[in-house]
Image: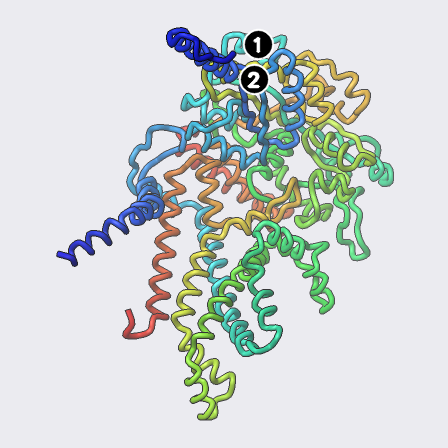
């Protein structure tokens, strides 16, 4: 339409006003439709999953764009701390229970709408463990997505060459398997470790792996008094047995050394015969070492379970879009895609894994476990990371001290020192049990 | 009147710069000092004043003590390696100024300073690798048994010192070269007439004259080395497993306390201790190296 000189000024003004209103309306409508939500993840391998979910909801929500920013976990935790406090956080945040507790204590994460709360609270969708992991003070705040759960990975070729069949069933067998599986050079120095243990590096990983082994010996790192209070319990029979086992393998049988390649990377390169890790390694092996002959087995007593949830830090329409996206991650098709393509175990109940397990039997140890199999988790208390980091530093010193090997009294001394450090932190935070 | 106007103009002209300087340099230091007296978890709006409690806790904190000792060893290790070595290398390069390779020498020494830290540290990680590293292979030629450079408690600190010195050397050499080029030739000629050898000229003429340069280089090197972080982070990190021994240093401890333990006030008290140490050491260096009679 053109405005001719013959059009009266009143009509011209009306048309101009109408055009302006139309443009403004179109702009506002466009901004409402073209919504962008950002996901912050601490697991770079999950990027394809989040993008897959975004694709799957495109038909229902054609104007929601999802941006995924995934970086290493520790850096992710830092940016969440800075992002939330400065109001510059992403809308969808992926957080472990212990980390989320800090933000929930301070009311910094959004409360989900009722349908999301009902979805998480429904026992047909999630067991009580995962619903609790996503809750704070009895209110659901997050949606459980995946969990870290451990199993033993073993190289079937190396086991066959050593005359072994099936994974070790007891912690004593771990020692004997490790001895038989270790490959050595002419001087007797190990070239392929029998059992790769987490012995070095920064952060709390050393403690977490130690706690997994300690659980097999019947202990847990912190004992709860049942009223929200805790006490360190490293200096126990289970603690001694665990540290003794590490030192036995390090200095007595020398099935592993601190400087040897370790963990998934070493397993994929056939530099270790056996190690304990979460299910994501299956996806990693599929992409990096597809010809590796390996299998997995359950642990002697049970496994750690570290649940990771999705939370929202937004309001209004952004929050609505974020919750829609989070609910889309819970579609069974998407969760099966997650297990199949990334390897992390979905938390949602009632999923049919049969096809995936038939194609990738290694997942069996993570989903088909004995009735008596037990689970534990790291306590969701504020200073848990500090506790684990401090313990890691002390354990690392112990792993470098050959004089401790076989000396139960000295081992107990190390563990009592750890207890003292941990209890001091718990006491400072008002969490120390009597 | 004109003088007053000029003075006012100067003040107004410099005021924006001063304001920016105060905001970005002075205010953060004040905030760190203030936070060190409070308990703050970065998330809460409450920051209760706790006086010197953070500092009292630091005295009992074994990880802080370890970090302080490691950082000090690294900082002085880097200082004692870098400054004399840089002085000697700069003297050699200066001595060969007329050589057609002079610029090659300068560039090759300076390159480590401008190379991005992470790839450089990754390369050193490979060099220090206990099983595949060329350093152990070289030592093996002389019959030395392979060393676990990144895992042994002592050698892991030595590795950090070597890496930091390698990085700091280029900058120190460059500054010394500038110093050498500005030394009066007449003094060298006079000493030569008096029969001084090249080494005597270096030791009795150049080194004393380069005292102000040595002061600057040593202060800059020490302050930079006390802030070591990325080097230890990269040397100990890996995608998963098989990382090196985490050499605990002060900046790492502060970052952990801030973002993992949510103890910003406590981390601020560590920063204050670091600030005080660096200030004291700088003052000592000034008093030792500043020429008498100068201000």
Which residue is under mark 1?
Answer: A119
Which sits earlier in the primary sequence, circle 2 or circle 1?
1
Which mark is drawn over residue B241? Answer: none
Q: Is residue A112 visible?
A: no
**Residue pushed farthest bottom?**
B194
* Cβ atoms under marks 2 and 1 closer than 8 Å: yes
Task: Residue B34: name its quadrant.
Answer: top left
* x 78%, y 57%: residue: A187
Subunit that carries the residue with mark 2: A
Name the foreground residue: A356 vs A215: A356
Badge 2: few (under 14), some or many (20 or more) residues near its Cα, within 10 Å? many
Q: Position of residue B224 (x, y in %)?
A: 46, 56
Q: CA distance from mark 2 to mark 1?
A: 9 Å
For the N terminus of chain B, the quadrant is bottom left
Q: How is the image coloured?
A: rainbow
On the rendered structure, is B58 left or right of A187?
left
- Determine the residue positioned at 48% across, 36% down: B260
* Left or right: where B19 falls relative to A90: left
Report the residue marked by disc 2: A143
């Amino acid at each position: 339409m053109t405005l001719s000189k013959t059009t009266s000024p009143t009509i011209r003004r009306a048309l101009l006003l109408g055009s302006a209103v139309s443009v403004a309306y179109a702009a506002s409508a466009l901004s409402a439709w073209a919504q962008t939500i950002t996901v912050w993840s601490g697991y770079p391998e999950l990027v394809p999953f989040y993008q897959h979910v975004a694709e799957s909801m495109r038909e229902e929500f054609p104007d929601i764009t999802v941006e995924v920013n995934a970086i290493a976990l520790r850096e992710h935790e830092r940016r969440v701390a800075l992002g939330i406090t400065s109001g510059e956080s992403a809308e969808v945040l992926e957080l472990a229970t212990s980390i989320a507790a800090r933000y929930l204590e301070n009311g910094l994460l959004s409360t989900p709408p009722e349908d999301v709360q009902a979805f998480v609270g429904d026992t047909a969708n999630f067991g009580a463990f995962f619903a609790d992991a996503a809750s704070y003070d009895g209110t659901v705040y997050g949606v459980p997505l995946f969990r870290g759960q451990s199993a033993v990975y073993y190289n079937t070729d190396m086991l066959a060459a050593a005359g072994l069949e099936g994974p070790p069933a007891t912690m004593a067998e771990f020692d004997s398997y490790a001895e038989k599986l270790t490959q050595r050079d002419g001087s007797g120095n190990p070239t392929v470790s029998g059992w790769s243990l987490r012995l070095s590096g920064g952060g709390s990983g050393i403690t977490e792996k130690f706690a997994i082994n300690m659980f097999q010996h019947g202990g847990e790192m912190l004992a709860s008094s049942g009223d929200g209070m805790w006490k360190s319990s490293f200096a126990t029979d289970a603690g001694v047995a665990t540290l003794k086992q590490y030192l036995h393998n390090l200095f007595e049988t020398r099935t592993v050394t601190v400087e040897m390649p370790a963990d998934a990377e070493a397993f994929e390169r056939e530099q270790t015969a056996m190690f304990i890790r979460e299910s994501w390694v299956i996806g990693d092996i599929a992409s990096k070492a597809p010809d590796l002959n390996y299998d997995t087995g359950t642990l002697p007593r049970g496994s750690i379970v570290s649940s990771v949830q999705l939370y929202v830090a937004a309001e209004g329409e952004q929050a609505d879009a974020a919750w829609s996206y989070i609910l889309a991650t819970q579609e069974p098709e998407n969760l099966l895609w997650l297990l199949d393509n990334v390897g992390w175990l979905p938390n949602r109940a009632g999923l049919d894994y049969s096809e995936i397990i038939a194609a990738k039997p290694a997942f069996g140890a993570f989903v088909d476990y004995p009735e008596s199999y037990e689970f534990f988790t790291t306590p969701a208390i504020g200073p848990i990371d500090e506790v684990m980091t401090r313990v890691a530093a002390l354990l690392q010193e112990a792993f470098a001290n050959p004089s401790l090997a076989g000396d139960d009294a000295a081992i107990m001394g190390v563990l009592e020192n750890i207890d003292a450090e941990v209890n001091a932190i718990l006491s400072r935070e008002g969490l120390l049990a009597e | 009147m004109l003088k007053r106007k000029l003075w006012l103009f100067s003040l107004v002209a410099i005021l924006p710069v001063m304001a920016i300087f105060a905001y970005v340099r002075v205010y953060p230091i004040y905030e760190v000092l203030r936070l060190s007296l409070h308990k703050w978890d970065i998330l809460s709006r409450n920051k209760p004043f706790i006086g010197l409690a953070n500092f009292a806790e630091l005295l009992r904190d074994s990880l802080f003590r370890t970090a302080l000792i490691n950082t000090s060893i690294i900082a002085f290790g880097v200082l004692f390696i870098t400054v004399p070595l840089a002085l000697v290398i700069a003297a050699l390069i200066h001595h060969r100024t007329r050589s057609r390779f002079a610029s090659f020498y300068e560039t090759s020494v300076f390159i480590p300073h401008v190379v991005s830290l992470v790839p450089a540290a990754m390369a050193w990680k490979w060099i220090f690798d206990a099983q595949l590293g060329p350093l152990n292979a070289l030592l093996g030629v002389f019959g030395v048994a392979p060393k676990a450079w990144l895992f042994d408690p002592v050698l892991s600190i030595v590795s950090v010192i070597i890496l930091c010195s390698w990085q700091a050397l280029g900058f120190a050499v460059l500054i010394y070269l500038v110093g050498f080029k500005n030394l009066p030739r007449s003094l060298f000629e006079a000493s030569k007439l008096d029969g001084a050898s090249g080494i005597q000229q270096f030791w009795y003429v150049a080194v004393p004259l380069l005292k102000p340069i040595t002061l600057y280089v040593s202060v800059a090197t020490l302050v930079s080395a006390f802030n070591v972080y990325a080097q230890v982070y990269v040397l100990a990190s890996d995608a998963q497993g098989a990382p090196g021994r985490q050499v605990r240093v002060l900046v790492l401890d502060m970052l952990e306390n801030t973002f993992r333990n949510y103890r910003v006030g406590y981390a601020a008290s560590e920063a204050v201790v670091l600030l005080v140490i660096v200030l004291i050491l700088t003052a000592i260096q000034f008093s030792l190296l500043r020429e008498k009679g100068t201000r």
